[in-house]
Image: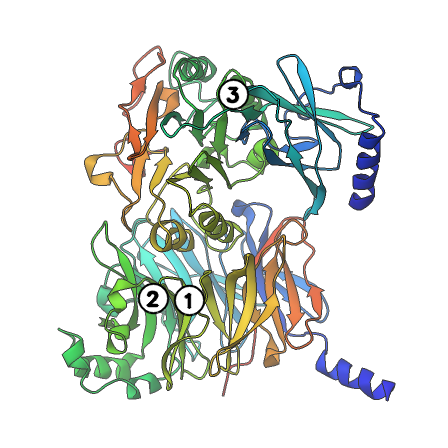
Amino acid sequence: MTFLFALMTAALCADPGGAIAYVAGTNQENQCVHVLHVATGETVRVGPGQRDGAPRWSPDGQWLAFETVHPDGLGICVARADGSERHMLRHARKWNRGPRWSGDGRRLVYAADAEMGMQQTLMVYDLASGAETPWAGERAGMMRPVWLPHLGLLLALDPDVEVVLEGVDFEAFVNDALIDGMGLAIGLVGDPGSLSTEAMLTTRNMAVPFLRMVTKDSLRHVEWAIEISARGDAIAFESNDGGFRDIFVLSRRGLNNVSNHHAADWNPVWSNDGRWVAFESFRGGRRGIYRVFYETVRIFPIAVGNDHDCWSPTWGPGDEWIAFVSDENGRPEIHAVHVESGRRRKLTDYPGYCLAPAWYAEPTP
Amino acid sequence: MIARRIRTAACMAALGLFGVHWALPVAGAREADGTLGLIQLPNNGVPVIIAPGAAFDAVLTEPAAMFLEGGGQQYALEGAWTPLPGNRVKVACTTPDTIPPGAYTIVAATGEKTDRTPRSVYIRESFPEIYSIAHVTDTHIGKDRRYPRRSDDIIRDVFRAVNEADVAMALITGDLTEGGEENEFRRFLALLDLCATPTFVCPGNHDRKDNNYERFFGPLYYMFTFGQDGYLVFDTKDYVTADDLGAQPGALERFRRILKPCRWTVGVTHRYEPSMGMRAQISLFLDNPLEFLVFGHWHRENTEQEKTTPWGHTRMIVTPAAIDGRIRIIDMTARGMLPRPVQQVAETGAAPQREQATTPEDSE
C-alpha cells in the first residue's frame, strides 16, 4: 500500500524536464539570454549579453528570438538554443522590441520605432528572405504584437460588424487576413493627455479594434498583455474594465472577467492545453501567481509569499509544472512549482538575477 | 543563523550589555569605503520622518542593539526583529514619546562592530498641511570640466541654499554623480551631510555603474509619507530594456495601493519617457494615477505643453540641473503642488561650455 502510494506520488510529481530560456545578469548592461536544461541543470549561454531581453521560443524549439543591443538602439537577435549560432536581423528602424514567432516559425513580428517614443509600428520579418515589412498598415502606437495560429477567430466575428466599426472595410480585412495571416496587438488610442490602449486585430494593411464588437465601451478601458491560446480559440487579456485591473477571456462563451478582484491581476499566460490561465495577482498582498480554469472561473494559488514577490509564470511541458521568478532569497531567481502537489524546486543559483523564464513546450497539433 | 543572532541581540539588550553607549567602539558611519554597512535603512539618502513615540522600520545585515543619537543624548530603541529575504533583518523601532524634535543619527551595535548613519531619522512634532519641498536634481558630482568651478563647490552652494530655504525635505532626483564611480558617491555623501533637512535620493542614468548606487544608498525604489501626503520614489535608469521584467513594477503597484488614501501622492524619479516600462505606467498613470510626478534629467524646465503625462492628468514638475546652479522650491498645499519659479542659487563661474539641452532627447 505504502509502495503504491509512493509510486502514485512519484508519478504525479515527476521531476520537471524540458528547457527554460531566461535572462541572467548582474546589471542591465550584461544581461544575457541563457537556456537551462531542467533535468540535468546544464546551462548554455545563448545571447550576446548586451542588454538581452525576454527570449521567445520558435515553434520547433530550435531557436530563440529576443531583443538586444543594436547600433544606436535595440535589434532582434535570433539564436540557436544550443548557443551555436546567432544572427541579428537587419532593421530599418533603431528600436525594435518584443519579438513573437508566427505559428510556422518563418516570420517574426515586433514593434519598431525610429525614436524611443510612442509612435512604434509593427514590423514583420521573413526569416528566409530577410525582408522586413511594415504590418498593420503602419499604424503608429502599436505594442506587444502576437500572431494568431489560424483564422478561426474570424468565424466568430459578427457579420454585421461594419455597423459597429465605423470606417472599417471588413471584407478587405478578411481578404488581407487570408493572404498574410492575422495577429493581435495593443494599440494606443486617444490624444496626449487622454491616451488609452485598445486590443487590436492586425493584418498586413489594417488594425481593427475588435473589442468594440463585443463590448461597446471598450474605449474607456485600458487593455494590455493580450495572449491567444495555443489552439487559437480563446483570447486572454487584462483590462481595468470594472474599475480594477482584471483578467478577461474572450472565447465561444463570450467575454468574461475570470479573475475579478479589487487587487490588480495581470500578465495572463495560457497553459499549453488552453484550459488554464496563469496570472499574477496582488490579492494576497504581495505579487503572487495564481491559475484559473477559465470555463468555471475557479482560481487556485500557485506561488504566493508573505514577504516576497513571485512573477513571470511559464507553463512546463504537459502543464504539470509552472516556472516563475521569485525574490524569496533576496534576489530574483527562477523556481518551479508542481501545479497539483505544490512541490517547489529552485532552478537557478546565479550570483546576479534571473528573469523572464520561457519554458519550451511542444506546439499544439 | 539569523534567528540565533536575533536571540543573541535580544539577550544582550535585555542584559544591558549596551548600556554604556558612549563607551562603545565607534567604527564611523557606514563602511570605511562609504558604502552601507550594518545599517542598510534608514540612511541619509533614505531617511524616516516621524513624530515622537512613532515607530519606523530599520533594515540591518544582522540583529544589533539600536539607538538614536542627537542633541548630545542617546535613546535606546526596542522592537521585534524579523528575518528578511537576502540575509537581512528588519526591526520595527519605537521611538520614545519624550524624544525632542530634530535630526538623529541611527546607531547599531553588535558585539563586534558599531555602525552609525547620521541624518537618518528626523523627529517632528507636527506635520503641517502646507509645507515646502526643495527639488534638487542632476548634481553630477565629478563633472568638473563643464564649468570653472568644481562640481563639489557648486553643489555645496546649492545645499547651502536648501538649508536657507524653509523646507520640510529635499528631493534629490538622480544623476547624483557624473560617472557612478565610488569616489564620486563618496564626494556626494560628504556634501549631502551638509544638508540640515531630510534628503531623499533616487538613482539616475549617470549613476549606473556596477551596483554602486545600491551599495551607497540601498533600494532603487521605496515609499514614504509626510503627514497626509505620500511619496513614491522609483528608478527609471533601466528604462531602455527589460523594464517590465524585474521586481520594480510589482513593488510600484503595491506601494501605489498603500498610498492610495493619501491626500496627494507624488512620484519622484530621475526621468520620465513615454516609452518607459508600460507596466509601471499602467500602475502609476492609468489605473491609480499619481497626482504629481517630480523629476529632472532634461536639464531644463518643462514647458506649457509638457504639463501632464500623456496618459492622463498626472502633473509633471521638471527642474533644471543643480550642476548648473539651479533648484526649485515646491509648495505643497491643499490645492496640490505649486512649483515656484526656478532659482539660480549657485554661481558656476562661467557660461556653459556648450548649448543647454532643449529637448528630452538632448538631455543627460
Same subunit: marks 3 and 2: no
Q: Quadrant of residue A109?
A: bottom left
Return the chain for callout 3.
B
Q: Quadrant of residue A254?
A: bottom left
Q: Nearer the viewer, residue A68 or B290?
A: B290
Q: CA distance from mark 3 to mark 1?
A: 44 Å
Q: Which of the two discs, 3 and 1, sits closer to the camera?
A: 1
Circle 1 residues within 10 Å: few <14, some 14–19, many ≥20: many
Q: Nearer the viewer, residue B11 or A267?
A: B11
Q: Which residue is mark 3?
A: B192
- Where disc 2 sits, the SS reads loop
Q: Position of residue B298 (x, y in %)?
A: 33, 33
Verify CB contact (< 8 Å) between mark 3 and mark 1.
no
What's under tag 1, amino acid-wise? Asp
Verify CB contact (< 8 Å) between mark 3 and mark 2.
no
Q: CA distance from mark 3 to mark 2?
A: 46 Å
- Where disc 3 sits, the SS reads helix
Is B170 displayed left or right of B362 in the figure? Answer: right
Query: What residue appears at the point 42 percent right and 15 percent down from the top-left corner?
Result: B154
Q: Position of residue A124 (x, y in %)?
A: 33, 68
Same subunit: marks 1 and 2: yes
Verify CB contact (< 8 Å) between mark 1 and mark 2.
yes
Q: Which residue is mark 2?
A: A241
Q: Which residue is mark 1?
A: A246
Residue A356 visible in the snapshot: no
What's under tag 3, amino acid-wise? Leu
Q: Nearer the viewer, residue A112 or B71?
A: B71
